[in-house]
Amino acid sequence: MFSELKKKVEEFSANPDLAMRQRAIDEGRMGRQIEIAGAFHRGKEEGREEGIEEGRVEGREEARAEERCKLRATVQRMLAEGMSKEVIAKVHDMSLDELKILLAEK
């Protein structure tokens, strides 16, 4: 088996056309491997960027929810102190409907 392989290698070496074809095949394979590696790294980077953006969006949503919760608690304290809904809405620059919606949230 080794002798057959050696014979084929010698034939390739002796025939420039076969050697050139094999070189083209090898270069094509290497080129595809380079393209695949590049695509993998680009995909990985895009995934990382998407994850960062999703984290930012989630962080902003959580911050808004926390602010609404704090506002609701403040409004409830103001109501407990006897302030009218009209005055509370005016102080917080919102309509009475918005105030009702805020108070209905859990």
Image (cartoon, rainbow, N blue to C red):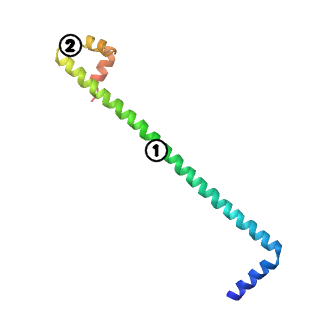
> x, y percentage for residue 20?
79, 69
Give the crowd class for mark 1: few <14, some 14-19, many >=20 residues within 10 Å.
few
User: For this rendering, which residue is in front, 22 or 72?
Assistant: 22
Relative to 100, residue 52 above or below:
below
> x, y percentage for residue 64?
35, 29
Q: Amino acid at mark 2?
A: Met
User: For this rendering, which residue is in front, 106 or 3?
Assistant: 3
Residue that appears at 26% across and 11% down: 87
> x, y percentage for residue 103?
27, 23
Tell me the residue that label 2 is attached to: 83
Relative to 16, residue 48 above or below:
above
Q: Amino acid at mark 1?
A: Gly
Quarter of image, res 86: top left
**Image check: 20 left or right of 42?**
right
Tell me the residue that label 1 is attached to: 51
Residue that appears at 34% across and 14% down: 95
Label whose residue precedes the other's in the sequence (1 or 2):
1
Residue 1 seen:
no
Q: Quadrant of the C terminus?
A: top left
Residue 53 seen:
yes
